Amino acid sequence: MEYFLGQIVAFPYNFEPIHFRKCNGMEMEVKSNQALYSLLGFKFGGDGVDFFHLPKMEDPCEGISYYICINGLYPQRN
């Protein structure tokens, strides 16, 4: 299954699946994540020049966490 860049998914894992990062507000470099930055911008934090933050989301219940796709299909726009 392929995911869209920036897509948020709930997984019942205690590890980060390949191409995903936990939605815990992690800081990311704009320079090395330009496609993801083009979708998220700095709306979740960061300076918008050198770095930006991933969304920070609380786990919906014990054993389930939210993860964001950081390497996937770029969503097409009309």
Image (spheres, grey):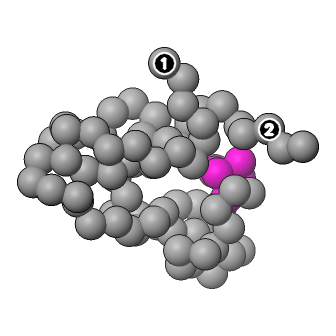
Q: Nearer the viewer, residue 27 or 58?
A: 58
Q: Position of residue 75 (x, y in %)?
A: 72, 39
Is residue 33 one of those drawn in magenta? yes
Query: Image point 33% across, 33% down: which residue?
Result: 17
Q: Please state the horizontal and vertical placement of residue 72, each as a whole percent of the image.
A: 59, 33
The residue indicated by pointer 1 is: 1
Magenta-drawn segment:
32-37
Looking at numbered disc 1 in the image, what kind of residue is underneath it? Answer: Met
Residue 76 badge: 2
Which quadrant holds residue 12? top left
Relative placement, left or right, of 58 versus 53 is: left
Residue 25 percent coordinates (x, y):
40, 68
> Quick one: which residue is furthest to the left in this view?
62
Residue at x 40% of width, y 64% of height: 26
Mark 2: amino acid: Gln
* Residue at (19, 47) in percent of width and height: 64
Instruction: Quadrant for residue 43, please give it.
Output: bottom right
Q: CA distance from mark 2 to mark 1?
A: 18 Å
Q: Is residue 31 visible?
A: no
